[in-house]
Amino acid sequence: MERTLILLKPDCVQRRLMGRILTRFEDKGLNIVAMKMMQVTPELAKHHYAEHVEKPFYPGLEKFITGAPVVAAVIEGLEAIRVVRELLGATSGLKAAAGTIRGDFSSSRQMNLVHASDGPEAAAREIELYFAAGEICAYSPTVTPWLKADDE
C-alpha cells in the first residue's frame, strides 16, 4: 500500500465540490485514512511550496492557497500516487481530459481544485507537514477483497 497527500484547494471548498471529488477517490477503491479542514498559513505555504518560494509566481500562489480553507487528506491504496494523479488529470483544467477531475470541473491553470503529491518523497514530506502520525487511521474496508487480489 502507498500513501499520498491531497489538498482540496480553496477553489474546491468554495465551489462546494469536496464531496463529489472525494467520492471519485473512494469509487476508485482508494481509502481515505486521514482528513481535516484547515486554514493554510503563510508559514505552512512556504514549507509546502518551498521549491517555488523564490519564483515570481509564488506570491499569487500563497495568496490563493491561504485565501480560504482547504481539506487535507491522506489517500491510501495500490500505486496511490500515480492513480490519484491520473484521476486528477493534467495540471491545467484547460488541458485535462474529460473524465478526469480537473477535466470535468476546472477551466483554469491555477484554479485546478486539488493538489496531489508527485512522488513518494514528496508524499512522505507533505503528509508529515499536514498530519501527526496519530491522526492517520489505517483500516481495511470489508469490501477490500472485492477491489484487489490477495497477492496485490
Image (cartoon, rainbow, N blue to C red):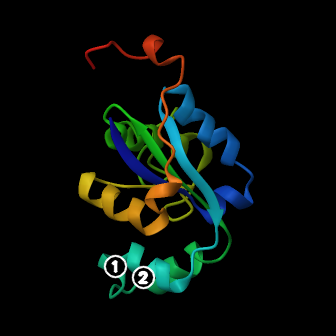
- Percent position of residue 126, x then y: 38, 63
- The three-letter code of the residue at mark 2 reads Lys
Amino acid at circle 1: Ala
Q: Secondary structure at mark 2?
A: helix
Which residue is tagged 2? Answer: 46
- Write the residue at 34% across / 79% down: 50
In the structure shown, which secondary structural element does the residue marked by tag 1 occupy? helix
Q: Quadrant of the N terminus?
A: top left
Dot 2 and dot 1 residues touching (CB under 8 Å): yes
Query: In this rendering, is residue 56 above or below 85?
Result: below
Spatial distance from mark 2 to mark 1, Cα to Cα?
5 Å
The residue sitting at 36% across, 84% down in the picture is 53
Q: What residue is pinned by disc 1? A: 50
Q: Quadrant of residue 52?
A: bottom left
82 left or right, relative to 138 = left
Q: Dot 2 surroundings within 10 Å: few (below 14), some, or many (20 or more)?
A: some
Rendered view: 25 above or below 54? above
**In the foreground, 50 or 149:** 149
Rendered location of residue 121, percent (x, y): 24, 58
Relative depth, front residue between 65 and 90: 65
* Residue 14 at x, y percent in the picture: 73, 61
